[in-house]
Amino acid sequence: MTETPGGANAPTTRRELHGAPSSEARVTRLVIMGPQGAGKGTQAARLAELFDIPAISTGDIFRANIKGGTELGKLAQEYTAKGELVPDEVTDAMVRDRLSEDDAKGGFLLDGYPRNAHQVEALDGILADLGWQLDGVVELTADRDELLARISKRAELEGREDDTPDAIARRLDIYAEQTAPLTEAYGERGLLAKVDGIGEIDEVTERIVQALAAELG
């Protein structure tokens, strides 16, 4: 058990989370999902520190491949340069490469992947090839009006003129449309832990680790 920033003892191993008896009891493999404004990035960083695993975001993976001039990075850049979405297959390959790195052998927290049904299947295949399985999926939830207010305030502070109320609302709609089938699928597998993302940062972190222990125990 480890003490969270808020002072509460939190389960930090797979054995403590859901009683895994294997020699991999200290390995924790998680996915975190949440709409814009729910504090997903903040919680991902805190959970990565708490569980001593790397937080792996698709944004970081893309930037690393492009900066490193890898074949996948060059391919992705061809699409982004034309204003096109990078195909799932390219993203899948980047994730596969990243999870094959040494630091991910002790566990990981995926942020921003999977985003659709295809990527869920692709992640299943990647993990199966590596002889692994997910331990849990955290979904941060939040009241829509609260999210709109949070994002609008942040946009105002950062001077982001493209974050209009209509644009923000549309992004939230797209997230809900794309994510609902994924969380439903993970819920059916008994992997989903839904957590209210509104509140003090320490409180939300504590909710997440308690929810993981409760849902996966």
Image (tube, rainbow, N blue to C red):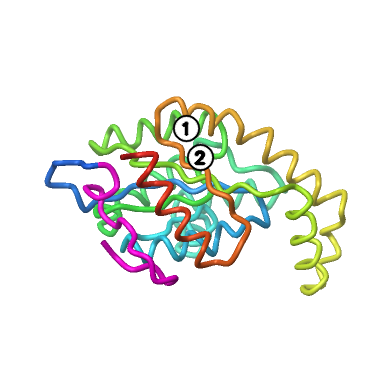
Q: Position of residue 2 (x, y in %)?
A: 29, 65
Magenta residue span: 1-18
Residue 8 occupies which quadrant of the picture? Answer: bottom left
- When the figure is inspected, residue 169 is found, relative to residue 204, above or below; the finding is above
Residue 126 occupies which quadrant of the picture? Answer: top left
- How far apart marks 1 and 2 lie (CA) works out to 5 Å
Q: Position of residue 106 (x, y in %)?
A: 25, 55
Tell me, for residue 62, which label it has, or none: none
Residue at the disc numbered 1: 120
Q: In the rendered structure, are the residues bearing label 1 and label 2 in contact, judged by CB atoms less than 8 Å apart?
A: yes
Q: In which quarter of the image is the C terminus?
A: top left
Please tell me whether mark 2 sits on a helix, a strand or a loop: loop
- Of the residues under marks 1 and 2, which one precedes in the sequence? 2
Q: At 47% across and 30% down in the image, what residue appears?
A: 187
- When the figure is inspected, residue 192 is found, relative to residue 105, above or below; the finding is above
Residue at the disc numbered 2: 114
Please tell me whether mark 1 sits on a helix, a strand or a loop: helix
Q: Which amino acid does label 1 sit on?
A: Val
Q: At 79% across and 59% down in the image, what residue appears?
A: 149
Q: Does the magenta stretch include residue 137?
A: no
Q: Where is residue 104 in the image (x, y as percent from the top left)?
A: 30, 54
Answer left or right for 174 relative to 46: right
